[in-house]
Image (cartoon, grey):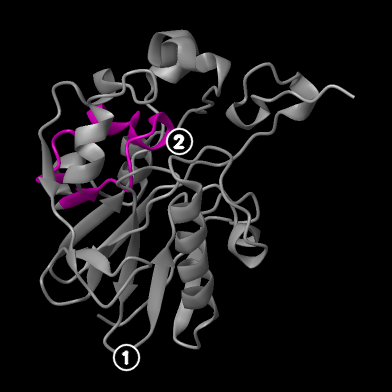
Amino acid sequence: MYRNPLAFTGLFRSEKNKITLPVSSYLIEHPKGTLLIDTGWNKTIRESNWKELGLQVQINTGYLPAGWAVDERLAEFGYKPEDIDYVLMSHLHCDHASGMPLIKNAKHILVSSQEWKIANKLPMVYLPHEWKGVDVETYDYEKSEFGPFHRSFDVFGDGSVLQVYTPGHASGMSATLVCGSNGKYVLLAADVGYANKSWEKMLTPGICTNRNYAIQSLGWVKEMAHDENCVEALANHDTKTEQHSIILPL
């Protein structure tokens, strides 16, 4: 039996072996500012996947119905891009970063310095044109009690919103930990796993920069997801996750 050695990349996969996955963004209404996690696809996708993705169309393609672009979704909640205080990028793969031009008027657009550095050095893996003309700021992870490698970035300096270093799928990737005043928390796990079952069954993403790191990140998310204080842990591409709101006292 022939097995495609590049199947994990999507290359040379037949149509019957391809699936459609959601690409999630998250809006956080915090007393200290309004935050957006990730930006999804650019509207260019509606015209041409090739124009937006180039050779990466061999790996994945985007699908963006009317009303689903990040600025369109924000408008449904009464926000304009310039109303957003912080856009926090989990990492800069195309399905998360393609929509960055749509929110370039946000007050601050942040990504880890580690992810930013490598994203601008690997144009076959990342697509730097997606943030061309966007004022991107970087942050450094610091020592922390949270995360598989005990490193995070405290957005407001009060422990309520943390960008937790969770490498493996991408070198500088972060999960977002939102902590309530009651000790409860929500974990936005980015692409540590593509679905919640990923950490339940310890299934690493097909594409990894470091498989060992990916396993450690999955293990940490699994532990956090099973903690009694976890309100919800969300994977970015889980087909079983529907749009919903979570209320957490901050």
Query: Is residue 144 depicted above or below 39 in this figure?
Result: below
Report x, y in % for residue 205: 56, 45
Quadrant of res 201: bottom right
Quadrant of res 248: bottom left
Q: Is residue 172 magenta?
A: no
Judge whether residue 42 can be spotted in this image.
yes
**Which label was assigned to residue 68?**
2
Report x, y in % for residue 60: 55, 24
Q: Residues within 10 Å of mark 1 (few under 14, many from 20)?
A: few
Tell me the kind of residue under disc 2: Trp
Left or right: 39 with respect to 169? left
Tell me the kind of residue under disc 1: Asn
Query: Is residue 162 depicted above or below 231 in this figure?
Result: above
| Residue at (36, 46) in percent of width and height | 76
Left or right: 138 with respect to 6? left
Task: Give the CA separation, mark 2 to mark 1.
Answer: 33 Å
In the rendered structure, are the residues bearing label 2 and label 1 in contact, judged by CB atoms less than 8 Å apart? no
Q: Nearer the viewer, residue 82 or 152?
A: 152
Report x, y in % for residue 33: 15, 62
**Which label was assigned to residue 72?**
none
| Residue at (21, 37) in percent of width and height | 116
**Which label was assigned to residue 182?**
1
Quarter of the image where the N terminus is located: top right
Mark 2 or mark 1: which comes first in sequence?
2
Q: Is residue 92 magenta?
A: yes
Report x, y in % for residue 191: 47, 49
Secondary structure type for disc 2: loop
Magenta span: 86-110
Query: Is residue 242 depicted above or below 182 in this figure?
Result: above
